[in-house]
Image: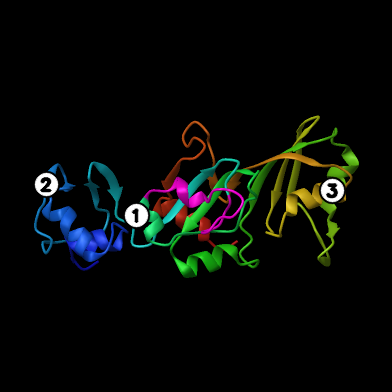
Amino acid sequence: MPTQTLVQILHSQGFGVRRACEGLILGGHLRIDGQTLTDPEARIDPQGLSFEVEGRPWLYQDKALILLHKPAGYECSQKASAWPSIMLLLPPPLRHRGVQSVGRLDQDTTGALLLTDDGPLLHKLTSPKHHVPKVYEVTAARPIEDRQITRLLAGVVLDDDPRPVAAQACERTDELHLRLTLTQGKYHQVKRMMAAVGNHCERLHRSAIGNLVLDGGDLPEGQWRFVTDAERAALTAKR
């Protein structure tokens, strides 16, 4: 990757307009490898660059892809209405870059959510042709019966499409809990599938997207992290 000026790097990462980024550098708020750099026009290779702005550690990302552990009570929208937006959980640089959620989770659904400012990647990950498996932990209102699992695996018809949708995998973890793996992404799909087999979804948590498994110990509710290059490659690999 060609070198960039320090002001170009901060601007590309969402730290404000160029004048604001110049002010951060001239004010001594940029540190790289423990050194304070104050020349906005100094050039550096940004690939793999770690730096600090106002004491906040940052990793250079040409295109950002992040994993968020979404809590309940947040909407997956830029301009929320009834509930706060998930964007409030992100630092200003990511919001300024215009990251968007890859698909959506209902306000009362928790778990793994991807966000990116990479348009082609967003399109690929949301395309029905890509078949990224997503794992959901379902808490049912009533005991889960064998026949319900059989129907979920065989496919049920939802009211907006005559073609049946089926779970890729379905495992009862106890009387009221189900681990459901889907490759489609229809509106309210898990809740509607549970209703179609005669049950009701009381709580819903997405525990994995493709190779990205959410561990609450490593990434608590409301926290986010960058997806690594290796994780990104596995996520976008052909299936």
- As shown in the figure, which amino acid type bears the numbered disc 2? Thr
Q: Is residue 85 magenta?
A: yes
Foreground label between 1 and 2: 1
Against 118, residue 183 (above or below) is: above
**First in sequence: mark 1 or mark 3?**
1
The magenta-colored residue range is 75-91
* Left or right of residue 36, residue 116 in this image: right
Q: Which mark is residue 23?
A: none
**First in sequence: mark 1 or mark 2?**
2
Q: Nearer the viewer, residue 6 or 163?
A: 6
Tell me where residue 224 appears, x and y as whole percent.
45, 44
Tell me where residue 101 appears, x and y as whole percent.
53, 57
Q: CA distance from mark 3 to mark 2?
A: 58 Å
Q: Nearer the viewer, residue 54 or 138?
A: 54
Q: Which residue is mark 2?
A: 36
Q: Which residue is mark 1?
A: 93
- As shown in the figure, which amino acid type bears the numbered disc 3? Ala
Q: Looking at the rendering, which quadrant does residue 140 occupy?
A: top right
CB under 8 Å between discs 1 and 3: no
Judging from the image, what secondary structure is the residue with disc 3 in?
helix
Identify the residue at image location x=38%, y=48%: 91
Identify the residue at image location x=36%, y=52%: 92
